[in-house]
Amino acid sequence: MTDVTRLHSNVPPRRSRDDVGTVLRMTETARPRRQEQERATAEISELAPNVLRSQLPIEIPGLGHVNCYLLEDERGVAVVDPGLPTKDSYAALRQRLTSAGIPLRRVHTVVVTHSHIDHFGGAGWLQRETGAELITHQAFRLMWDPTEPPDVDVDDVIEDPVDAELPDDPERHHVRRYPWQTTPWGGPGIDGISLRRRMWFRAGQRFPRLRRSPRPTIRLADAQTISLAGRDWVAVHTPGHTDDHLCLFDPEHGLMLCGDHVLPTITPHISGLGTSHDPLGLFFRSLDKVADYGDAVRLALPAHGHPFTDLAGRAAAIKEHHVHRLQRLREASSELGRPASVMHMSTVLFSPRAQGAMADSETFAHLEHLRLTGEMDRRQRDGVFEYVLAG
Ligand SMILES: [Zn+2]
């Protein structure tokens, strides 16, 4: 194996609990360049026996790379989150494998942590070229393919699912709408999507099989184990960022592959457009779930940013961030003294620079959480949801 920075096998601390706190506070004030924004480098580092970190380039607002972990064993290698479905990304992936001394044909497995394109995008390409297995969570589903997952009853996997069969149900937040259409809470969709892009979306939903999408071959249930890198990993279902988010825990070396569930200095987007009624509530539970591992996790391997210690502390800090936002919404509603739309409440939580469909969607997830816990009432006026403190 060549060009690999061999670190110590037993995962030295990279960031102390204090540093994590400092970074979190800094993100809210000084806004330094965050590690998740760093551009991908060609460096390959060994984090633990048979576990390598490589980075692939992505250009998504706020993100400069996605970590693509390589898990080696005697059969070859498993690739975790193989990046975007672009020529540049795939070329980078091939270069990383070469510099790690791994021929492409040795890729026997692809693991995808969740159904966002910077994570699963390269999986279809790799599958076609290598015939690799594709491991996801049971509930893995592509946004343009509502027929997925084929053999899984989503009701068994997703707690409290929104009924996607009732197109007129105002509770239904989910698929079969397009990003440019009015949102379920009565807000504007995403502007500026070209006609060509719209046709691409429509065609994809009507004929999902035409798009060369990755097809999971192994769908893991929570707590199921899978052998990779010469040891067993435990599947940890962590819905919140997406319903199908999967972490993998290696008890032998204390590693947790944590995808976007827990990131070192930024918080993952919590969308109000998921398949469950209360994505924020699910996210809270999933944060508690990984925090409960405590010291059993010695190193967390996020999909963006640097590997970090103190997963429990970081999960608690992210939860606190959202608890704080819930409190700001309660206070804003109390000060206002009348019902307000999601778009209005979004200005309470997000800076003008961050306003838009994603900010609204996350605000909606927070307001729905408050409604479902009985703290807020919702009414609908001219197709627009409005929220007010209950009572
Ligand atoms: Zn991501």
Image (tube, helix red, strand yellow):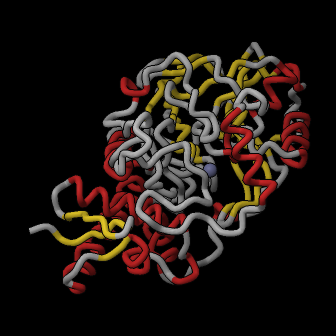
User: What percent of the width, then of the height, locates residue 50?
Assistant: 69, 28
The picture places residue 359, in percent across and down from the top left corner, at 50, 68
Question: Which quadrant: the N terminus?
Answer: top right
User: Against 98, is 308 above or below?
Assistant: below
Picture residue at 55% right of the left edge, 76% below the top: 354
Picture quadrant of residue 297: top left
* Residue at the limit of the structure toward the top, as seen here: 75
Residue 169 visible from this viewpoint: yes
| Residue at 44 percent of width and 31 percent of height | 236
Q: Nearer the viewer, residue 203 or 79?
A: 203
Residue farthest toward the left in the current orientation of the protein: 391
**Which one is in front, 233 or 143?**
143
Residue 291 visible: no
- Image quarter in which the C terminus is found: bottom left
Is 364 on the left-hand or right-hand side of 105?
Answer: left
- Identify which residue is drawn at 45% across, 18% down: 224
Q: Report the front residue among 20 and 383.
A: 383
Q: Is residue 1 left or right of residue 165?
A: right
Give the x, y percent position of residue 349.
41, 75
Residue 338 sits above or below residue 359 on the image: below
Which quadrant would residue 207 be assigned to in this image?
top right
x then y, percent, for residue 9: 63, 36
| Residue 163 located left or right of residue 76 | left
Number of numbered discs present? 0
Nearest to the observer: residue 168 or residue 301: 168
- Residue shown at the point (78%, 58%) measured from the top left: 195
Find residue 181 and report its image quarter: bottom right
